[in-house]
Image (cartoon, rainbow, N blue to C red):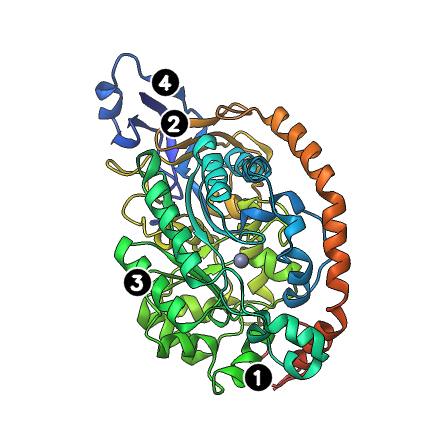
């Protein structure tokens, strides 16, 4: 199957033009076969021809940090700080165990939203309630397989008890709750590694490499050192990205004082020898200069989720300090109850704006081109696919997004990079291709029946609403103690401030 794009402009991130003059691109099988005047001559007679006149062909957008299991929970919660939010988001209750069909449908909901807006790849740091099972992993991966999107999926599962993961709780909780939160997790390291074995042997490399595995520790404070090392071994052996949330909140910086001899989480991981170029450090908000130097030396990538960071009041990531060190940045939505859309254009715009209030030195504010670099090349680097994605050139994988420039977002066209970041919302995307297959075309997904999907999702998750309400009530027991923990952490002096305005403590 071949596709010939005729007369398209190609996005250029380097140089001053923004985009190329009109040209042709031939896709053969899953890869780009030719770019330029020869492409049409090389096209087989049965190639599908797409008229690209007045359109921009760009590498597909990459959602580099995402958690699919709460795709059905968008808009469900008020804005809350992470540690309180998590009480409601993912309690490990039997009543919240999904059926394989629910897992399949909820996964496809976000696939539809992403493919329609030109997102061709996603890194899903999936957690499983109450624990990962082969049938739910299979349901999630089958949804990705059927939707046509490219995915790397990890199992975001801690193996330590709740009490070890958070500061102050030991003193704050009454004895019965303390004992409950100190219980070892029923699903331990060996079971988790067994699930990784299933994920990797069944799915890694499936669909000609479109489906891949990754590994995740969730966050370093949530796993034992031996499990952390075991995950790093898996990541190294199979060449998989390693996802780790680090210093998303001030409370996580405070935890370092209590549990890691005053070291930051980054320093702790660095001392374990586990910072690597495979690692995606998710958030990196409450980082200091030493942390960033260590990340730069290790060659890790930072996953930036500016909308989630605002929704959960986590703080503002030090964008310029990261860029100055040459640390690659990729962009993500995070999850659908912390964004709550799965729209990478909105994420790009927020990333392009939020750092302008970091300080008055306007020359350090982000440029649109830097945001596009994170969205496209940063995402490819995070996936370990920097030689396959992120560029339209012969030999690269044909993960492509066709953007109509005859829309209000680009009329008149003053500066393509800025208008992609600040004007576009995804509605100008007219075609999405993943691995050479057209998955969205002229307003319609070709791989799934969207009206049927929406109808089934409404029905399935309306039936789930009582279980979610019961789970929320169960969280109320812990709320006063978590609130006290949060307040204590917020009042601590950690030598930095990542909140804006007057509310945060200053050093
Ligand atoms: Zn996350």
Foreground of the two, 316 or 138: 138
Foreground of the two, 296 or 20: 296
Give coordinates of residue 80: x percent, y percent.
70, 63
User: On the image, numbered disc 4 is attached to which residue?
Assistant: 49
Q: Are marks 1 and 4 in contact (CB under 8 Å)?
A: no
Select label 2 or label 3 by which is in front.
3
Question: Label 2 neighbourhood size at 10 Å, few (<14), some (14-19), many (20+)?
Answer: many
Give coordinates of residue 345: x percent, y percent.
54, 45
User: On the image, numbered disc 1 is attached to which residue?
Assistant: 494
Give coordinates of residue 204: x percent, y percent.
34, 44
Q: Give the residue drawn at x 47%, y 87%.
A: 261
Q: Earlier in the sequence, mark 3 or mark 1?
A: 3
Locate the C terminus and report the quarter of the image it occupies.
bottom right
**Quarter of image, res 460:** top right
Question: Label 4 neighbourhood size at 10 Å, few (<14), some (14-19), many (20+)?
Answer: some
Measured in 3D between alpha carbons, the distance from the residue under mark 4 to the one under mark 3, in whole angstroms, is 46 Å
User: On the image, numbered disc 3 is attached to which residue?
Assistant: 233
Is label 2 in a helix, a strand or a loop? strand
Select label 3 or label 1 by which is in front.
3
Give coordinates of residue 268: x percent, y percent.
42, 78
User: On the image, numbered disc 2 is attached to which residue?
Assistant: 437
Measured in 3D between alpha carbons, the distance from the residue under mark 1 to the one under mark 4, in whole angstroms, is 59 Å
Foreground of the two, 304 or 56: 304
Measured in 3D between alpha carbons, the distance from the residue under mark 1 to the one under mark 2, in whole angstroms, is 50 Å
**Quarter of image, res 439:** top left
Is label 4 in a helix, a strand or a loop? strand
Select label 1 or label 4 by which is in front.
1
Q: Earlier in the sequence, mark 4 or mark 3?
A: 4
Q: Would residue 263 be found to the left or right of residue 468 on screen? A: left
Q: Give the residue drawn at x 46%, y 83%.
A: 263
For ligand 1, tell me if the residue under mark 2 lies within 8 Å: no
């Amino acid at each position: 199957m071949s596709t010939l794009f005729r007369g398209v402009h190609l996005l250029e991130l380097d140089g001053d033009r923004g985009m190329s003059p009109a040209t042709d691109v031939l896709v053969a099988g899953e890869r780009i076969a030719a770019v330029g005047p020869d492409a049409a001559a090389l096209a087989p007679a049965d190639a599908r021809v797409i008229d690209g006149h007045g359109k921009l062909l760009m590498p597909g957008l990459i959602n580099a940090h995402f958690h699919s299991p709460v795709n059905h929970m968008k808009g469900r919660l008020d804005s809350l700080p992470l540690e309180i939010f998590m009480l409601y988001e993912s309690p490990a209750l039997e009543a919240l165990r999904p059926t394989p069909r629910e897992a399949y449908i909820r996964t496809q909901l976000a696939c539809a939203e992403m493919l329609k807006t030109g997102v061709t790849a996603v890194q899903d740091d999936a957690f499983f309630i109450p624990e990962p099972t082969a049938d739910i992993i299979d349901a999630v991966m089958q949804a990705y397989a059927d939707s046509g999107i490219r995915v790397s999926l990890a199992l975001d599962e801690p193996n330590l008890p709740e009490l070890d993961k958070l500061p102050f709780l030991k003193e704050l909780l009454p004895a019965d709750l303390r004992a409950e939160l100190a219980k070892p997790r029923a699903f331990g390291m060996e079971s988790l590694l067994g699930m990784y074995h299933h994920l990797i042997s069944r799915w890694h490399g499936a669909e000609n490499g479109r489906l891949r595995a990754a590994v995740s520790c969730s966050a370093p404070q949530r796993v034992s050192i031996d499990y952390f090392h075991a995950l790093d071994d898996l990541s190294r052996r199979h060449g998989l990205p390693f996802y780790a949330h680090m210093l998303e909140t001030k409370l996580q910086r405070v935890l370092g004082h209590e549990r890691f001899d005053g070291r930051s989480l980054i320093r702790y991981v660095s001392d374990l020898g586990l910072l690597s170029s495979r690692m995606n450090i998710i958030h990196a908000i409450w980082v200091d200069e030493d942390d960033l130097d260590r990340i730069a030396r290790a060659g890790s990538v930072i996953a930036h989720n500016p909308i989630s960071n605002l929704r959960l009041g986590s703080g503002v990531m030090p964008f310029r300090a990261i860029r100055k060190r040459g640390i690659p940045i990729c962009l993500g939505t995070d999850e659908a109850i912390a964004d709550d859309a799965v729209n990478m254009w909105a994420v790009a715009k927020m990333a392009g704006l939020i750092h302008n209030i970091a300080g008055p030195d306007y020359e350090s504010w982000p440029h649109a081109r830097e945001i596009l670099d994170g969205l496209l090349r940063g995402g490819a680097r995070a996936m370990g696919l920097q030689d396959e994605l992120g560029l339209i050139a012969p030999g690269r994988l044909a993960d492509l997004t066709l953007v109509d420039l005859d829309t209000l977002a680009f009329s008149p066209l003053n500066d393509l990079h800025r208008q992609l970041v600040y004007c576009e919302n995804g509605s100008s995307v007219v075609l999405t291709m993943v691995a050479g297959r057209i998955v969205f075309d002229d307003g319609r997904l070709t791989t799934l029946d969207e009206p049927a999907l929406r109808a089934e999702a409404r029905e399935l998750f309306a039936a789930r609403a009582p279980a979610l309400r019961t789970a929320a009530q169960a969280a109320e027991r812990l709320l006063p103690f978590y609130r006290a923990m949060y307040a204590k952490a917020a009042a601590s002096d950690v030598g930095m401030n990542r909140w804006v305005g007057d509310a945060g403590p200053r050093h």
